[in-house]
């Protein structure tokens, strides 16, 4: 369960930020 908590608190936000960054770069 601890790994799942880590996944949602660390990996998912980073993935979301990277996705938003890619969207910004493609818009330039």
Image: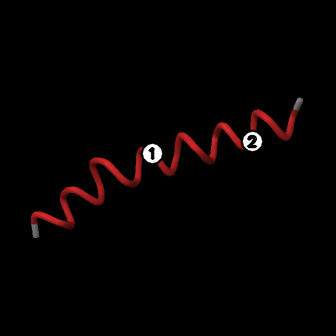
User: What secondary structure is found at the residue carrying circle 1?
Assistant: helix
Residue reaching furthest to the left? 2
**18 on left or right of 9:** right
Examine the rendered structure and indicate whether residue 23 appears above or below residue 15.
above
Coloring scheme of the render?
secondary structure
Classify residue 5 by image quadrant: bottom left
Residue bearing mark 2: 23
Residue bearing mark 1: 14
Q: Which residue occupies 27% across, 48% down?
A: 9
Classify residue 13 by image quadrant: top left
Q: Which residue occupies 66% across, 37% down?
A: 21
Examine the rendered structure and indicate whether residue 6 appears above or below residue 4.
above
Residue 12: horizontal and vertical position, in percent? 40, 53
Q: Which residue occupies 10% across, 63% down?
A: 2
How packed mark 2 is, by other alpha carbons closer than 10 Å (few <14, some 14-19, many 20 or more), is: few
Mark 2–mark 1 CB contact (< 8 Å): no
The residues tagged by marks 2 and 1 sit, at their Cα atoms, a distance apart of 14 Å
Locate the N terminus by quadrant: bottom left
User: What secondary structure is found at the residue carrying circle 2?
Assistant: helix
């Amino acid at each position: 369960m601890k790994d799942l908590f880590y996944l949602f608190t660390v990996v998912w936000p980073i993935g979301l930020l990277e996705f938003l960054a890619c969207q910004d770069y493609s818009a330039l």
